[in-house]
Image (cartoon, rainbow, N blue to C red):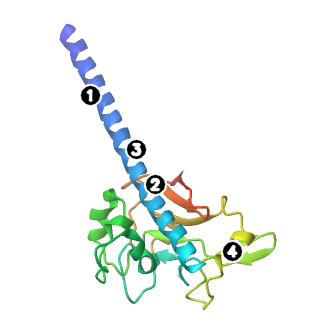
Amino acid sequence: MELLAAITLLATLGALAFAMARSAAQKTRRAESIQVMRQIGASLATYTVDHGRLPGPLNSAHSPFFSTSNKNLISYLWPYFNLPARPQTQELLPQFVPRHWRAWFEKQDPAASRLYRTTMTVTEDGREVSPWGNSNQGIPVPRWLEVNATIRIADTVALRDLYLELAPSYALPKAGELQNYSARLFFDWHVDTIGLPR
């Protein structure tokens, strides 16, 4: 009887330890995703000061791989990441990708994988603005002062990671495979996370 009680106690402690370790790992991943998104936000904030506008014109889906032919976020922001040299074409930028995603993306086709999605059009009080312009429609990027005056920047999402609506067009991890939330960057450069459907 005492042996059975001891086995039950050990099994319970083991299950608790596993749950705590899993929770700690998820918190670490979430913290790193937020940190990467904050770094992107800081780069965007500096870019807007330097250029008076956001990078672009862009399309909506962005790869974590550098490309000279496809103008995605990395093409514009890599100088703001304190890299020792210009990235190589099809190079995965670690500063742009949380650590727990890097191995997954390294196995993907750079031309088909996407990690980030920009908010292309915002309508506020009947006024419409395309903060990033639109490379597919030939819409130029408006001045940052116009964007700032048109939209509620603290309430409007600028960029999301792990945006599942991009699938199946692009390679993306399945919900819950690496994490169960998405980090969001707003136009005032603060970051939060939102749960993903399973």
Q: CA distance from mark 1 to mark 3?
A: 20 Å
The relative height of residue 195 versus residue 129 in the rendered view (above or below) is above
Q: CA distance from mark 3 to mark 4?
A: 36 Å
Can residue 163 be spotted in the picture?
no
Q: Secondary structure at mark 4?
A: helix
Q: Choose top left, top right, bottom left or bottom right for residue 152.
A: bottom right
Q: Earlier in the sequence, mark 2 or mark 3?
A: 3
Can residue 95 be spotted in the picture?
yes
| Image depth: mark 1 or mark 2 in front | 2
Residue at (38% x, 74% y) in the render = 113
- Compared across the picture, whether 58 is left or right of 21 comes to right
For label 1, count other residues whose C-alpha is less than 10 Å away and answer few (under 14), some (14-19) or many (20+): few
Q: Choose top left, top right, bottom left or bottom right for residue 106.
A: bottom left
Question: What x and y, as percent, mark residue 64?
Answer: 38, 72
Q: Earlier in the sequence, mark 1 or mark 2?
A: 1
For label 4, count other residues whose C-alpha is less than 10 Å away and answer few (under 14), some (14-19) or many (20+): few
Badge number at residue 27: 3
Q: Please report contact status of discs 4 and 1: CB closer than 8 Å, yes or no.
A: no
| Image depth: mark 3 or mark 4 in front | 4
Q: CA distance from mark 4 to mark 1?
A: 56 Å
Furthest residue in direction left, as rendered: 3
Question: What x and y, as percent, mark residue 98?
Answer: 36, 59
Q: Earlier in the sequence, mark 4 or mark 2?
A: 2
Dot 3 amino acid type: Lys
Q: Secondary structure at mark 3?
A: helix
Badge number at residue 145: 4
Q: CA distance from mark 4 to mark 2?
A: 26 Å
**Residue under circle 1?**
14
**Residue under circle 2?**
34
